[in-house]
């Protein structure tokens, strides 16, 4: 089985995950001839298109990529094109997450921050989506910076960020550039219970369940109320569910197995 890696400018996200699949002996990786990633398993029906982009803008622009004669199935990691299949998602750096998880997942009492958001606005879409309310009113730590079009938009390194969110019990989730955000996967990997604030985040092959994996609040007051109403015991249950969901859907081995499940291998 081969993964043809898209011609893109970044090496993290799915590009890094595909390399980890190769390192685990799950597949081979080679360069794609275009800006999309593909999975080839010698199926006579054709390859599987792996759409790793946050939005479908590029997909809409390229009519030849939309031609169903070019593939047998199309999987979408973030925004879902109508009539196609939801896939998995990933942290920004799966290697860093995997390494940090070797230390275990902090317990309720080992965390010193009840609720948190750490993030930035890197582009106008994120800025609009993340400033609709004063979200700092509903969490204990709200670290939000505006760095539009900056080449270094993040205040913390990826490892610093991961270590920081592991201190929190609840993590506020604000809409970003696409319907999903890598922060949410990083939350769940580390047992942080996410609180979603918009409706289009859940296009997964194995969808998340409200009050099982996440809380939902439409505005700061509701978010604060939902956090306050969640007992230590309920948090422990949800935190465990988050880690379990991550292992099945977004870890190195779990994401590959789920991908195989979706395509019927």
Image (cartoon, helix red, strand yellow):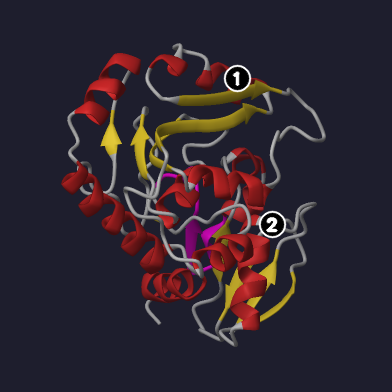
Which residue is painted at 60% across and 88% down in the image?
25
User: In the figure, 58 relative to 253: above or below?
Assistant: above
Q: Which mark is residue 144?
A: none
> Looking at the rendering, which quadrant does residue 86 occupy?
bottom left
Inspect the magenta stretch and tell me whether residue 45 lies in it: no
User: In the figure, 170 relative to 222: above or below?
Assistant: below
Which residue is painted at 26% across and 30% down in the image?
227
Q: Position of residue 141 (x, y in %)?
A: 48, 26
User: In the figure, 110 relative to 217: above or below?
Assistant: below
What range of the chain is rendered magenta? 67-82
The crowd level at tag 1 (other Cα within 10 Å; few <14, some 14-19, many 20+) is some
* Label 2, label 1: how far apart the Cα atoms are: 23 Å
Instruction: Depth check: give the residue in front, 164 or 182.
Output: 164
Inspect the magenta stretch and tell me whether residue 72 lies in it: yes
Which residue is painted at 68% across and 71% down in the image?
4
Residue 88 seen: yes
Q: Which mark is residue 12?
A: 2
């Amino acid at each position: 089985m081969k993964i043809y890696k898209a011609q893109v400018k970044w090496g993290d996200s799915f590009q890094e995950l595909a390399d980890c699949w190769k390192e685990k002996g799950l597949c081979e990786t080679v360069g794609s001839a275009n800006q999309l990633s593909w999975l080839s398993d010698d199926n006579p029906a054709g390859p599987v298109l792996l759409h790793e982009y946050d939005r479908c803008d590029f997909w809409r622009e390229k009519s030849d990529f939309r031609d169903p004669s070019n593939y047998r199935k199309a999987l979408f990691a973030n925004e879902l094109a109508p009539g196609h299949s939801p896939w998995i998602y990933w942290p920004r750096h799966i290697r860093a997450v995997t390494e940090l998880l070797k230390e275990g997942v902090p317990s309720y009492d080992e965390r010193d921050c009840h609720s948190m958001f750490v993030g930035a606005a890197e582009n106008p879409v994120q800025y609009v989506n993340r400033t609709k309310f004063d979200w700092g009113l509903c969490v204990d730590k709200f670290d939000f910076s505006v760095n539009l079009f900056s080449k270094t938009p993040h205040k913390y390194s990826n490892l610093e960020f991961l270590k920081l969110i592991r201190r929190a019990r609840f993590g506020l989730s604000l809409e970003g550039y696409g319907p999903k955000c890598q922060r949410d996967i990083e939350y769940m990997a580390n047992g942080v219970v996410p609180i979603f604030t918009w409706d289009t985040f859940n296009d997964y092959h194995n969808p998340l369940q409200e009050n099982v994996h996440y809380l939902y609040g439409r505005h700061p007051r509701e978010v604060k109320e939902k956090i306050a109403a969640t007992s230590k015991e309920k948090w422990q249950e949800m935190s465990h569910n988050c880690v379990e969901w991550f292992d099945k859907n977004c870890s190195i081995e779990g994401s590959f197995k789920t991908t195989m499940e979706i395509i019927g291998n």
